[in-house]
Image (spheres, rainbow, N blue to C red):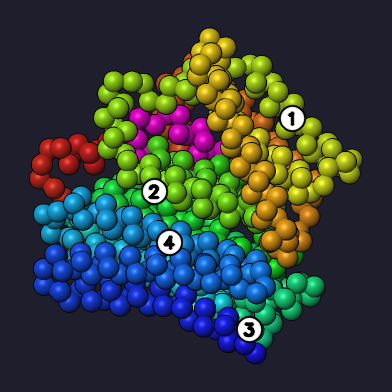
Amino acid sequence: METVMDGLSLSALACSVPALYLVAGLASMLLHRPEPAWQLARAASGAAMLIALAVAVLRGVAGSPPAALQIAGMAALLLIAFLGWVILRFAAPYLAGESCQQRFMSGVLITLAGAALVSVTDNLAVLALAWSATGLGLQRLLTLYPTRPGAMRAAHKHFVSARLADVTALVSVVLIARETGSLSLVTLSTQTADVPMSTGLSMAALLLAITAIIRCGLMPLHGWVLQVMEAPTPVSALLHAGVLNLGGLVLLKVFWLINQSLAAQWLLLIAGGLTTAIAAVAMIAQSNIKVRLAWSTCAQMGFMLVECALGAWHLALLHLIGHSLYKAFAFLNAGDRVTRARSAQLFPSTSGAMSPVLVGLLLAAALLVPVLHGLGRLHGSGAVFALIGLIALAPLLTGMRPRFGRAALHTGMTTAMVVGLAVLWHLIFEPLMAPLLEHEPTTGQIAWLTALFVAMLLFQGWLRSGLRSRRLQQALAEGLYVDEFIDSLPGLRRPLSGARQPATPVFQEQERT
């Protein structure tokens, strides 16, 4: 009884974080000057981070080890609280003098409230509502500059896709409640893991997979992720580091459903794999640093959902945390990257032709994985870890060239450190999250991921060798024109009403290009 009460007290303490964000966000709308609103926002973000740390420490010193879902929720809550604290501190001087400061603060705090509630809630319906609230808070941030048609058009596309995701999430919640009679994530994970999949649950799994694909900005509904760059840099950091990643967390919370649905797994594999491959090659053709980072996010989100489809939930959690921290740093440091790019070629370590020896070794290792898995010589989790490791290390390894001895040594040491940390995470968190790792990937799924990796590696090597046409380079820069097709659909081409065409020639030129 005492343990139950302690668990309830910790849950209530964790739920105070989204409540704190929400109260601060609503209060910031009522203040007449930005200075007290900034003080309130910084105080709320600092208090939220302290509470998240306290929850993690209390969970850690509890008598019994935390459950897998509690580990994921604690990690996500800590991450969101830390990102909110950093972004709000960065944004205060960045937006000094802007008329949209209070709208920005309220939007950020509401978005953080929704993301934090997604992390801590045990109720599937509350999770769906909190996920929707995160999108509404983000919509407020994307419309900070209503006089810019480009920004408003991208915000409109986000609004349409987000409402579509709301519908699919709501229908899936209704189906799960009707089929199981419960909306508690803990109850569902323990009582329905061995229950045969009904038609309703299969449809719910597919709808949740579709929701995650839309919310994570995967192709073909990825265009708004690339086109919201007119929003302030802190908004981009929050979007790419804290909002898009929520799709992986939600799938992790409904692992029991995805593990049993082969159709949902293949949908995530196909959408995530194709998005990763196309975005990875589209990055090469980009000259704008923020657009390049946006394509990187699309690739990483696709990769994370592939890990979810294969049942590598502990690796998906590592990917979520690592990508969030890196992308927040990359966007907040984008100004410095632009300055340094004036005196040096962007990403020199990966420019030029790839090392044919290393490419050959990577290809041989990748092709060996599905063969060993099919012969029963390699366990499913081992095959997934090997493939994901090869995909993650390929950009580092292929940048090593014999004529740059010091650079090759540095890359080799970095690779060894990354491999060591990944293996350490795998050894520690695979046992802790063992209840989630009940899904054994099929040989067909392993072969699909291998084929994508091989094709992507060969195509990138061909592109970097200089054997490409101007037309192909333009097609890659435009993401193979997938977004142009989506733009032609009814309701997505028009900007929101009230947007005014800027009179300055600079903005007109931006709109034409």
Q: Quadrant of the N terminus?
A: bottom right
Q: Where is residue 424 in the image (x, y as percent from the top left)?
A: 65, 46
* Residue 287 painted magenta: yes
Q: Distance between the residues labelled 1 and 4?
A: 37 Å
Q: How far apart are marks 1 and 2 (CA)?
A: 33 Å
Q: Give the range drawn in magenta.
A: 277-291
Q: What element carries label 1?
A: helix
The residue that disc 2 covers is: 328
The residue that disc 3 covers is: 3
The residue that disc 1 covers is: 365
Q: Is residue 119 above or below residue 312?
A: below
Q: Is mark 3 on a helix, strand or loop?
A: helix
Tell me which amino acid carries mark 3: Thr
- First-in-chain label (3 vs 4): 3
Query: Nearest the camera: 506 or 183?
Result: 183
The residue that disc 4 covers is: 80
